Structure formats: C-alpha cells, structure tokens
Image (cartoon, rainbow, N blue to C red):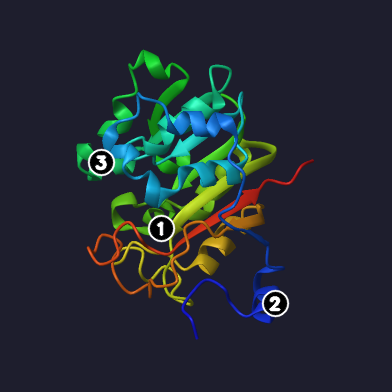
Amino acid sequence: MSKSFYYPAALCLLMIGAVPRSVHADTPIPSAIAAALADARRPSSQVSLDAVRKPAQLIAFAQLKGGDRVADFMPGNGYFTRLLSDVVGPSGRVYAFLPAEQLANCAPTEVAGTKALEDDRDYANVSILSGPAVKFRVPEMLDVIWTAQNYHDLHNSFMAPTNVAELNKVFFKALKPGGTYLVIDHIAEAGSGIRDTESLHRIDPLRLRKEVEAAGFILEAQSEVLRNRADDHKLPVFDAGIRGRTDQLVYKFRKPKL
C-alpha cells in the first residue's frame, strides 16, 4: 500500500469525518500574486526556491487578498512574509511571529531574513512579533494564519514546553469567524503520529489534522501542489536525496462562521 496521507475512505469517515475536496496545481493565479513573485526586492536566494516551493499556487489556494490581516507563524527567513506583504498590500497587515523558544534555541541565521524586515521601510505593513508560542498574540483579529514546514517542530525538544493543543486553540481565537488556518508540512509514514517529528522533521497528516480539528477548525480543502509520491517518507527532510522535493501536505482549515 502506498505510504501517503490518503487513508481508506471508510477509516477516515470513522475517525475524523468526511474527506475534504482536493485542489490540484491548476488553481488560477491572480495578478496580485504574480506581481508579488516578480517583485525585484525579493532576495535572489529566495526567488530560486520558487520552482519547488510553489508560492503562487499556495497563496492562491489560501485565497489571500488585498487588505487581509495575516500572521506568518515561524516565518524562518521571511520567504513567505515578503510575498504575503505584497499580496495584502498597503491596506493589509502581516504579523511575522517568531516564537521565543525558537529564538532561544536555534541559530540566529535561521530567522535573520525575517529580522531584517523589522526596519525595512519597503515592508512597512510587516510587524515582527515575538513571545512564547502559546502566548501568540496580535493586535487585531486575523483573516489568515499561515505556517509553512514547521508545524511538526511544535512537538520537538527545541520548542518545549509548547502545548500544541493550547496553541491551536489560541490560533482559533485569533481568527475572525470564517478565517483560514493554512498549514504546509512534510509528510511522515501513515500511522506514525509524531514519531518522526524530531528525527525526520515529518508528521503524520492524520495526527496533524486531528490536533487542529480538536481546536474547533474544519478541514475545508487540501492542495496537491506539493505532493511527491516518489518520496517514501523515510528520509530526513534535509537529506540530499530528498531535500526540496519532500512529499508535503497543504491543508486549509476554516474557523466556522457564527
């Protein structure tokens, strides 16, 4: 049986409800997103990643638009922060949230790209925030919470003592009714739960989905754009044999409207 996150339909229905619709790579790309990718201010080292990270399709899938308030949680080098800033425009706002646990336990180079935006007048709609992960706070209600390739890290020792269940509840409260929680992450073997989050930097999609849904979110859709069925989910994501080409989930969760 293929080791992917497609479990038998009957099992999914019993365990976590109906399987959401799947969106493939042909999502139309709005002009605002195309313009963001073409922005000459973007570092060349980040532009070179576009072919494998598929940012245009991902942002279109999230349905981000001008004027939105969005949080980029654990933004790393600011790859998506810059793009989100362009897409939401001057009437929007991006809150790049760097957890205190990450700042205390990881090399400064991991977040240097985001920190560089703090005083960059070209990105005046970006605010850099920090604090313990479960104390995530922004000064206004959000349209979107975005987290890419790092949800699994919440279960790892360098992020201790993050309470993942509590954090998902905090995210739920931070979103407007009908708001979006967009999660991108590396896929682990089916049934592995959080066994491989530390060693391989991967997470079982079913485990991730159950954790997020427990906070009240509904899984509205999943995108196929980062799937790679040639990945057997056994290598660490930084291994040269798979780096940049891992099989990844893209889940769009929704906070129900009132």
Neighbor class of circle 3 (other Cα within 10 Å; few <14, some 14-19, many 20+) is some
Image coordinates of residue 170 in percent, x first then y, are: 56, 42
- Name the residue rendered at 20%, 42% in the picture: 107
Dot 2 crowding, Cα within 10 Å, few <14, some 14–19, many 20+? few
| Residue at position x 29%, y 31% in the image | 43
Spatial CA distance of label 2 from label 3 is 40 Å
Mark toward the viewer: 2 or 3:
3
Instruction: Name the amino acid, label 2.
Output: Leu
Indicate the quadrant where residue 24 lies: bottom right
For label 2, the residue is 14
Residue 18 horizontal side relative to residue 81, left or right? right
Image coords of residue 200 (percent x, y): 31, 66
Q: What is the x, y in percent for residue 156? A: 34, 58
Q: Which residue is drawn at 24% across and 45% down?
A: 105
Q: Which of 178 and 104 is in front in this view?
A: 178
Of the 4 image quadrants, the one containing the C terminus is top right
Instruction: Give the mark nearer the N terminus: 1 vs 2.
Output: 2
The residue pinned by badge 3 equals 110
Residue in front for this viewpoint, 9 or 241 = 241
Looking at the image, tell me whether mark 2 or mark 3 is earlier in sequence order. 2
Distance, label 1 to label 3, CA atoms, is 16 Å
Above or below: residue 123 compared with residue 233 = above
Question: x, y (%) of residue 5?
Answer: 52, 71
Residue at image x 38%, y 31%? 130
Residue 19 shows up from this direction: yes
Taking depth in this image into account, of 221 and 212 the one nearest to the observer is 221
In the rendered image, which residue does mark 1 sit on? 152
